[in-house]
Structures are given as C-alpha cells and as structure tokens.
Image: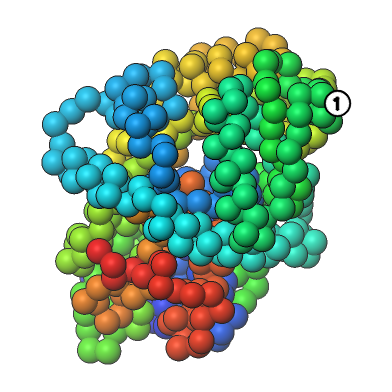
C-alpha cells in the first residue's frame, strides 16, 4: 500500500531555483506548499551556472540580427552555438518557430518584460543576502562586456540603447579605460560596455538560501520524490510519487527542461528544448577580475568568486542529453585563456559541470495557467535567465494563483500561448 504523504494547497514539481521561489511566494500568501524534487534540491540547472544576476542580459533568446550568425555556427562543434547533426522533427519544428520569433517587435516586448522581472529579482537577491544565515556571495560589482571587432561593438551599443529605455544604465569604455579598470583582461579588445547595476552570486548557495527562507514559512521540500503520475480527484489532484501519495489542489510544473516531457503526461504540448551549457572553476589568479566579464563574441562568461574564477559558456541544443563533450569544454577554456591570464587549466583534471537550460522557441518563459488544465500552472522555460528572474517569477505566479492583481504584466509570459 502506498504511503499517504498528506495534503497541500499547492504541489510544485521541481526543486530548482524557480520552484523554490514559487514556493516561497505562495507560502507568503498563506498557502500550504509541498515541493517535489526527483533528485536533490538545486542540483539541476541551478547548481553550477555562471551565477549572473544581470538585468542587462535578461533578453529573449530569439533575437533579431543573430539568425545568420547562429546558422553559421550550427554545425561547428567548437562554436558557441551548436547542434549535433541529426534527423529530428521536434528540433526542426523548434528551429522554424525560433526563426519566426527572431523579429524586432516581439524581441522588444519580451526584453521589456524580462528586464522588469529581472530588476525586481536582483533587488530581492540583495535583500535576501542581507538577512540569510550565510552569505551566498552576492556582489553588485557590475558586468563588463568586451568586444573584439567594431561591428559587434556597434550592435551592442544599439542593444544597450534599447535596454536603457527599460531602466538599465550603461557606460561606454574605451581600450584605455578597460586596461585601467579591469587589468585582468590581457587579450586584444577594441572597447566595451559596463553595466554598473548588474550583480553575481554563487548559484547553489543562493538556491539553498531561498529554500531556507521558504522552510521558515512552512514549505515542505521532498527530495528523491519523483512524480510518477497526477490524477484529477474531485476539486484537486492525486499526486503519486516514488515516496508516496500527496493530495494537492493546485499543481505547479517548475521542472526546468524536464517540464516538456513531464507535461506530456498531463496532455500539455510544450515546445521545449534543452540547451546544454558548461562551467568549471579555475583557481584565483592576480589580478582577479573586479567584476563579471562577458567575452561577447566568444559567448563566454567569467564570474569572479572570492576564491575562484568560474568560466561558463556554450549553447548546444540537445534535448535532455547530459553527456560532456570535452572538445567543446576545451574550446571554451581556450577562448577564455586568450583574453585573460588563467594559467594552466587542464579540462581533463577539473570537474566540469553541465546543465540544461529550458528553452521555448520564442525565448520567453511560460508563467501562468496551462492551456486546458484548470488546476495546473507553469513556471518554466527561462533559458539563460532562470537565476536572475526566479524571485520575480515566483511572485508573478503566486499572484496569479491567489487571484491578486499582478504587479507586472503577465501577458508576455502567458503559459497558454502554445
């Protein structure tokens, strides 16, 4: 006989940063919440990402002007954006939708919405750092994007002018300013953009701080609790897990890249693909970067933590494949080493983390009630913006479930748009 694990107002499927943020905001509104994580809390895409809390980069993945460049990269195994050649109708359909959404008008609408969500979220992380029992390395030291050719820099300045309209200040740095302000950069650059309000943190401790805050409000987190099926039962749902049965009025799917395959069990059709990214930690060297650094043309993120340097990057459309491609990792490290003095970094001797970013073809997360499902809600599809928008996502979803007037416009995130 299956164990009865009790009742909840809301059961959240997924114990990453988005699931934890939704749990916290729902508990603040008096809901009894259970979070069901099939593995360990925060060990998915939340665990080893760049840790960037950068509203300046809170943009839809489907961006105008990037299509031809991306197509040129697609089948180069060492490029920043890669698709392993294969016959896959799901991938082909996703790419067609992606190209259709790579237009200026939808991009600007999405950028405005994501930036608003991100700015509130970064302020939330700053407040949480001040009251959390242990620091998770929050630092608002800014982000410096550096460029190696004039065409890329000019395009970046146009993009910065757009995001400035949505409240993101920036500074234009010439080569002399970069050398003086950020001597860690030793490669050839022609200029850069500095975003002073951007921040970073250590991602896994940040998730744990969020979990701790939610637990203090009564949220129960269940690890190793894989959801096997969900059956509507009267006014709620019977949720059968690998640890027993829970009865919940509302279900929130916040399972990252696995939301697509999980949603199919409930009859949902989410056009989601996983985009694999890598990161590794290199030892601290002097001069240590004073701020986060984005090697823009190479699509490589440099995150200066207190005792280490995190190198992150690449985007590979893979579905749910978590294998490690050492050649791509080596290319990422080699590219970073051409711009900063990293010393000897052997990719064979260090732990390489990889995570799957959940990507919708329009590059926007799905936040709200699922199509045709009265008691099922979505909080997923955040691509590279999960950490930087999670608190805002949790607040918006909790407002929608609770029937409150949303503090941000929910329309760009409509979960029933697919």
Q: Residue at x 32, y 29 (%)?
A: 71
* Relative side of 245 to 185, left or right: left
Residue furthest top in the image: 344
In percent of width and height, residue 352 lies at 51, 26
In the image shown, does 365 or 267 lie closer to the viewer? 365
Q: Residue 215 falls in which quadrant of the image?
A: bottom right
Q: Residue at x 45, y 88 (%)?
A: 403
Label 1: how many Cα within 10 Å (few below 14, some 14–19, many 20+):
few
> Measured along the vertical axis of the image, is residue 208 above or below residue 49?
below
Whether residue 258 is visible, yes or no, is no
Q: Quadrant of the N terminus?
A: bottom left
In the image shown, does 392 or 81 lie closer to the viewer? 81
Q: Residue at x 69, y 38 (%)?
A: 193
> Measured along the vertical axis of the image, is residue 69 above or below residue 358?
above
Q: Which residue is mark 1?
A: 180
Residue furthest right in the image: 180
Q: Residue 255 falls in which quadrant of the image?
A: bottom left
> Measured along the vertical axis of the image, is residue 225 above or below residue 70?
below
Whether residue 193 is visible, yes or no, is yes
In percent of width and height, residue 322 lies at 36, 34
In the image shown, does 26 or 382 lie closer to the viewer? 382
In percent of width and height, residue 417 lies at 28, 67
């Amino acid at each position: 006989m299956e164990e009865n694990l009790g009742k909840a107002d809301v059961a959240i499927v997924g114990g990453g940063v988005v699931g934890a943020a939704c749990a916290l905001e729902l508990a603040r509104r008096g809901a009894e919440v259970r979070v069901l994580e099939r593995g360990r809390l925060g060990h998915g895409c939340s665990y080893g990402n760049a840790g960037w809390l950068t509203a300046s980069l809170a943009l839809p993945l489907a961006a105008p002007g990037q299509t031809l460049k991306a197509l040129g990269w697609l089948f180069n195994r060492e490029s920043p954006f890669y698709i392993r050649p294969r016959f896959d109708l799901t991938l082909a359909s996703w790419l067609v939708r992606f190209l259709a959404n790579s237009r200026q008008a939808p991009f600007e609408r999405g950028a405005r919405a994501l930036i608003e969500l991100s700015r509130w979220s970064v302020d939330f992380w700053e407040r949480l750092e001040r009251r959390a029992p242990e620091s998770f390395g929050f630092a608002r030291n800014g982000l410096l994007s550096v460029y190696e050719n004039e065409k890329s820099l000019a395009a970046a300045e146009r993009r910065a002018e757009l995001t400035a309209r949505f409240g993101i200040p920036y500074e234009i740095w010439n080569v002399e300013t970069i050398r003086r302000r950020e001597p860690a950069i030793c490669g050839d650059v022609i200029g850069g953009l500095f975003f002073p309000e951007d921040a970073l943190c250590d991602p896994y401790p940040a998730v744990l701080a969020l979990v701790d805050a939610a637990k203090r409000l009564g949220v129960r987190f269940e690890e190793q609790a894989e959801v096997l099926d969900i059956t509507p039962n009267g006014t709620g749902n019977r949720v059968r897990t690998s640890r027993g049965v829970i009865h919940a009025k509302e279900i929130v799917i916040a399972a990252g890249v696995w939301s697509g395959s999980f949603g199919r069990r409930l009859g949902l059709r989410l056009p989601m693909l996983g985009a694999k990214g890598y990161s590794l930690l290199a030892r601290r060297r002097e001069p240590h970067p004073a701020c986060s650094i984005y090697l823009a043309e190479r699509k490589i993120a440099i995150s200066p933590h207190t005792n280490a340097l995190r190198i992150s990057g690449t985007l590979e459309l893979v579905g749910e494949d978590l294998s490690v491609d050492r050649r791509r990792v080596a290319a990422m490290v080699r590219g970073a080493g051409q711009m900063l003095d990293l010393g000897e970094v052997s990719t064979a001797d260090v732990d390489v983390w990889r995570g799957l970013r959940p990507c919708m073809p329009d590059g926007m997360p799905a936040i709200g009630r699922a199509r045709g499902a009265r008691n099922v809600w979505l909080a997923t599809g955040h691509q590279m913006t999960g950490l930087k928008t999670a608190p805002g996502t949790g607040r918006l979803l909790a407002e929608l479930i609770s029937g409150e007037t949303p503090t941000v416009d929910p329309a760009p995130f409509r979960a029933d748009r697919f």
